[in-house]
Amino acid sequence: MKKLFLSAALVALTSLSLSAQKPAGVADGGISPELLDKISAAYEDNAYDKAISNALAGTSIATLAINADNAAMIDTHFSDRVRTKGITDQKSSGRCWLFTGLNVLRAKMIDKYGLPGMEFSQSYLFFYDQLEKANLFLQGVIDTRELPFEDRKVDWLFSNPLSDGGQFTGVSNLVSKYGVVPAEAMPETYQANNTSQMANLLKLKLREDGLELRKAYEKGSNKNALQKMKVAQLSEIYRMLALCLGEPVKEFEWTRCDKENNIVSRKTYTPKSFYDEFIGEDLENNYVMIMNDPCREYGKVYEIDYDRHVYDGHNWLYINLPVERIKEMAIASIKDNVAMYFSCDVGKFLNRSKGVLDIANFDYESLMGVKFGMDKKERVQTHASGSSHAMTLIAVDIVDGEPVKWMVENSWGPASGYKGCLIMTDEWFNEYMFRLVVEKKYVPEDILKMLEQTPEQLPAWDPMFSMEE
């Protein structure tokens, strides 16, 4: 009898202990045995499911989901195409934004001067990009020194001290400040082509430096003292970058040739004088960033806090427009032989072997027997989609007055996709295109007038920008 009483008491105590672990006011939302039976009963495990399960056991989902009805190669003719030469390769790095921005500029330079081809040095600007971003982080830590460490902006800074990704505002700020050099003046290094290890070390060092700045402030250091600490910290970052990428070239000789490779001129340049002579554009004032952000009101101007590459530069600022208006400007630019900076969610429905982006490429619904029904806005809101890669928009195919497909010059090498390019259907463009940077001369007056608005500032952690290329 005593043993039975002790056993009952033990069970009661165990029940009390388990119930005490459950947060107050929280309903029972776990998977009980009864609920598991109900869920599992919905799986029929019939011959069809068995066949799919067998196939999935040894084959990738993407391979099995290929839509055989859409297997034929898309027509590669385009009614309008920008004249470009050569395909670049960002290798194992996140520098698509930099390659794309420089590809827009080099297309202009090749066409204007009749060059047999040329490429700007990505390493040169990447060095300054990383140095400037390091300064942006450290100065951000100083600026937020009075906020608690748990503050969301402080947490965001330490979560994102530096990256090799970016967008066109970074290109315009960096080029305006540092100029450009041809690829041969500062070649790529292994670390430039494979940025992950270098980036991890830089981020580790910056986080340590950021903590030191906050600790110094807590011990009474004033802003001037913190600024001196920052200079010493940036000197170490400079050293790391110089070891990995080489020190940026300050002067170089460059020979200009014509299409037949005959020498036209040979001169010594600085990065700024080279840019002034061969490009000479005011990138910061001559271009407009347009976005199709379905989460925000159209016809408005938005600015993203801390989304810039240079502390004394500009935040990412854009006009939000319906995709139909964006297409008008894109077509006008292409017809005038001017390539554009373009970004999208490149990983969605990409057939890599063909180099085609088409929502009909894969039939995941039939394979899995479930429906995927979110629209563009819902995908962005839930972090399921966003701008992940930048490329150069160079072609459109117009049939009966309407665009049916588009083509971008990519930076994954000439063997990737369709001759180094990707072709997208107009339906895919509608769903997964997000950003276009276009010269003001192709922007209608009613849209330019929107720039007179006071921009609405969005936080750096807004869902639209969490997948930034």
Image (cartoon, rainbow, N blue to C red):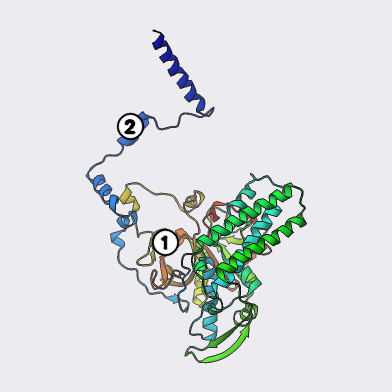
Disc 2 marks a residue whose amino acid type is: Asp
Tell me which label, 1 or 2, sits earlier in the chain: 2
Q: Secondary structure at mark 1?
A: helix
Image coordinates for residue 56, horizontal then vertical, percent: 29, 50
Disc 1 marks a residue whose amino acid type is: Glu
Q: Quick one: which residue is furthest to the left in this view?
A: 47
From the image, state whether disc 1 or disc 2 is nearer to you: 2
Please name whichever residue, 385 or 201, is drawn nearer the observer in this view of the structure.
201
For the N terminus, the quadrant is: top left
Position of 442 relative to 344 (above/below): below
**Residue at (39% x, 49% y) in the render:** 372
**Residue at (48% x, 29% y) in the render:** 27
- Tell whether label 2 touches label 1 (CB within 8 Å): no
Image coordinates for residue 374, horizontal then vertical, percent: 44, 50
- Kindly identify which residue carries mark 1: 427
Question: In the rendered image, is residue 469 in sight?
Answer: no
Position of 249 relative to 298 (above/below): below
Q: Quadrant of residue 235?
A: bottom right
Q: Crowding near pointer 1: few (<14 within 10 Å), some, many (20+)?
A: some
Q: Quadrant of residue 357?
A: bottom left
Q: Quadrant of residue 32?
A: top left
- Kindly identify which residue carries mark 2: 37
Label 1 to label 2: alpha-carbon separation: 42 Å
Image coordinates for residue 4, horizontal then vertical, percent: 39, 11
Please name whichever residue, 208 or 23, is drawn nearer the observer in this view of the structure.
208
**Residue at (25% x, 49% y) in the render:** 54
Image coordinates for residue 115, horizontal then vertical, percent: 51, 85
The numbered disc on residue 75 is none
Q: Secondary structure at mark 2?
A: helix
Query: Viewed as shown, does residue 227 lie left or right of 238?
Result: right
Please name whichever residue, 247 or 148, is drawn nearer the observer in this view of the structure.
247
Query: Viewed as shown, does residue 343 lie left or right of 225?
Result: left
